[in-house]
Amino acid sequence: MRPVLLPLAQRMGRLAMRRRGVATRWVETPQGRIHAYDALGVGALPPTVLLHGIGSAATPFAPLLERLRRDVCRVIAPDYPGHGFSPDATVRLTPEVLFDSVSTALDSLIDEPAILVGNSLGGAVALRYAISRPERVRALVLVSPAGALATDDEWSELRATFDVASRSEALAFFERVYHRPPWFMPLLAHEIPASFGRRAVRELLESASNDDAPSRAAIRSLGMPILLVWGQSERLLPETHFEYFATSLPDHAVIERPEGFGHCPHTDDPGALAARVAAFARGLELVS
């Protein structure tokens, strides 16, 4: 069935964010328009960008965004093409098209080096942006990032995870994604099959491959401060993907495996994640 509750929740979330002073921006890119939230903060820490996962959107970052505003000067959270309020891309949405469109949006929105916080697919986007535009990235926070080199079996299993055809399969998916699924998730489960079946999600899953993964040498060459957060309750991505990043990141990277964090800790415990990102950002002043 066509999703009704999910779009309604998105609209209500955006309305609530606007009432708290969060602005909506639209950025034109060669691949289509990108919607983004842009919120001024009351802190002195660097501007922070939040990058979401596949099939998700910027609106679920709202609790994290609000907490970060207390410590940082600005928070930006874009919707990828075909996600959230952004329309579908004008061309097939491959990882390359996704990166080009989001990079164009960030180039337009960011006016000084920013902290990039990327979750899941957002981690892969953040990592690639840091490799291609290191001068624009003050620091990198990778939260259960996607994009590791994977075996054929791992790719097949990961794609199959998003092949959700029923409410019961959606509930099983929630169990893999969250440390403890929020109470309201069962109310939305019947809409997940159609949500995951939309064009943007299908095209990304069909086109993604190891060819999109950055090399170990490129990852290891990163000079900015890096924090890798991989929760103890991570059940969506295999342990080999954590090992890939843990062994590829430069020696100065900080690697943490917190309790109570699943694949999406901005939902599991936004307060704890915001506190860790803010503490990491405050530490940047010591190495400036």
Image: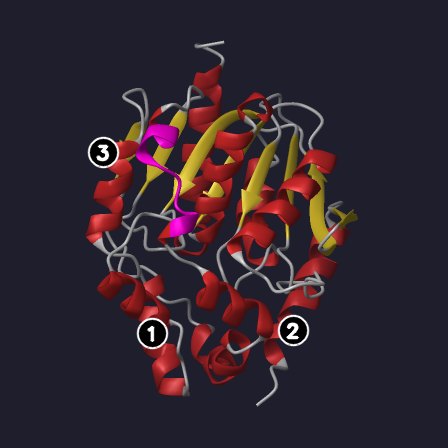
Amino acid at pointer 2: Pro
Quickly name the residue at label 3. Answer: 247
Badge nearest the viewer, 3 or 2? 3
Asked whether residue 120 is in view, the answer is yes
Where does residue 184 sit, x and y in percent of width and height? 47, 73
Assess disc 3: are there few (<14), some (14-19) or many (≥20) residues with their C-alpha within 10 Å of its C-alpha.
Answer: few
Dot placed on the residue nearer the N-terminal end, 1 or 3: 1
**Three-letter residue code for mark 3:** Thr
Residue 270 percent across, percent down from the top left: 46, 48
Is residue 163 rendered to the left or right of residue 99? left
Classify 149 as above or below 218: below
Q: Name the residue beneath numbered marker 2.
A: 7
Could you say whether the residue bearing mark 2 is in a helix, strand or loop? helix
Q: Secondary structure at mark 1?
A: helix
- Residue indicated by mark 1: 160
From which residue to which does the magenta span run?
211-219
